[in-house]
Amino acid sequence: MKKTWWKESVVYQIYPRSFMDSNGDGIGDLPGIISKLDYLKQLGVHVVWLCPVYQSPNDDNGYDISDYQQIMDEFGTMEDWEQLLEGLHQRGMKLIMDLVVNHSSDEHHWFAESRKSTDNQYRDYYIWRPGKDGREPNDWASFFSGSAWQKDEATDEYYLHLFSSKQPDLNWENETVREEIYRMMTWWLDKGIDGFRMDVINLISKNPELPDAHTPDPGIGTMPPDEGQTYHFGGQHFVNGPRVHEYLQEMNRKVLSRYDIMTVGETVNVTPEDGALYVGEDRNELNMVFHFELMQVDSGPGGKWDIRPWRLSEIKQVISKWQTLLHNKGWNSNYLNNHDQPRMVSRFGNDSVYRKPSAKMLATLLHTLQGTPYIYQGEEIGMTNIRLSSIDDYRDIETLNMYQEYKEAGRDTDAIMESIYIKSRDNARTPMQWDGTEQAGFTKGQPWISVNPNYTDINVQEALADPDSIFYYYQRLIELRRQEPIIVYGDYTVLQPEDEQLFAYIRSYEGQKLLVVLNFTDQAQPFKLDAHVSYHEPQLLISNYGGDHGRELAEEARSHNLRSLSLEPYEARVYLWQE
Ligand code: NOJ
């Protein structure tokens, strides 16, 4: 397997709006991020992924871009951005930017022109169609509720928007559009950035006939249940569409391959087989993809808001499939939350009594799989989901549209709010909790979205003062990955895949073995190492229980008895030995 810097790196994702506000307007900004670079250095991460900071009317918090080469006023200036890049590079860290080119904002000048007339020179930059029988051109639903088409008065035609009506889809069939995008990417790369995270990149190629979806399909799960609905998920006509690989290979040839950078594509509804086509090392497309299979383990047939409990065996099945299928072919990206997902400790761990051990246990999983770990801001201090008392306190367009649609369909308000508490994207978007002062030290003003009231207990200042904190555990995991190549490059074998309490696996590399055992429950659990796994003088590399128990564990390892272990609630242990 080829060795590269981005396989050995740990990425930290920043959602700028919620990270740090420097000027008291309640909105995080670039100078705010710059003021926290030493914090990131202390954590030890190698790469920062910055969510969109471009000019935007903020219908979807920056994922609706009106100028790809300007910085959003609320976030600062291009000089601030340059200082950020320099500050990262000076500290030995890299910067990757969010590339949002499935769609632009309707306030982009391309679209302002495009909508003017059917023969405007920008008309074909977007996907326009006349209506059919007095209705939309087809029955596709938008990911953010309602139809994926918006009628535009000026020409009496409809444009396609897979997301909000302020996010018209760009027409990748048009070569001029592609050239504009490549030019813009080159411009950023020439400024010295180290790569891109590519927003919903597997949706850029649509079946040009734009056929009806017809068949109900809950899709990536952001859709309401389909029965009786007017609009349907049309994924079969745009997920991994007909020309997507051609486009990415072209982008790679014309832009990406000319730089030493990393790329990670957000790809909805992909299987590992699809994933291999994007990241196969011989395919010259992307380095990694973010898949959604793990994010769907707690969704029912009705999609994201149809919530069901997850099962550990399914989590293992998904992870094992991706670990095995990409091995020696491509590279995995591993994440347990981001700005679109609930907080991992609330979702897969325990955000009350066992918040600290369970956050550390999940971190152990994230950092000991094959693939590049992605940490989302606040994860390293164990930030949790939030319950805002009124829908008026929510800000996320997906949440607000769903609420509206479900209300109109006559659903029970309390039930809707319950699903929002579990799944809303705003769970991850509350301000970063820096200290115990008012507004968690995030802003001197009124934050754009409420601070989680638990900031008095859960904050960076507290974490830095506690040697046993989640923060320092992350720091150790990040260091370990650098010290032990087996963690990066070793292959992966799952043990006891059907077990619903423990997740255990073995990594192997150049005569070494690593055993990871994770307790996903709030009960003590016995673990028996399969008889066919032989071991030799194991060393306890890391565990999330300190104090006396930690000493006992180290002792146990020295006594070389791994056959029969007993794990505390949410305990994680990692052993290493030479064969
Ligand atoms: C995925 C992004 O992560 C999400 O925040 C956004 O709403 C959609 N793509 C549309 O750009």
Image (cartoon, rainbow, N blue to C red):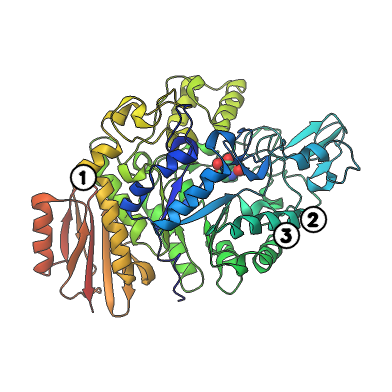
* For discs 1 and 2, the disc positioned in front in the rendered view: 2
Seen in the picture, residue 186 relative to 150 is either above or below; the reply is below
Asked if residue 255 lies left or right of residue 424, the reply is right
Mark sitting earlier along the chain (3/1): 3
Residue at 32% x, 71% y is 486
Residue indicated by mark 1: 523
Residue type indicated by callout 3: Pro
Name the secondary structure under disc 3. Answer: loop
Which of the image's four quarters has the C terminus?
bottom left
> Is residue 564 in view from this perspective?
yes
Q: Residue 527: horizontal and vertical position, in percent? A: 21, 59
Q: Which mark is residue 242?
A: 3
Question: Around disc 3, counting alpha carbons within 10 Å, would you say few (fewer than 14), some (14 to 19), or many (20 or more)?
Answer: some
Where is residue 134 shown, x and y percent of the image?
86, 31
In terms of image quarters, where does ligand 1 lie? top right
Mark in front: 2 vs 3? 2
Residue 130, quarter of picture: top right
Residue on which the image places disc 2: 176
Front residue of this view, candidates 28 and 146: 28
Q: Secondary structure at mark 2?
A: helix
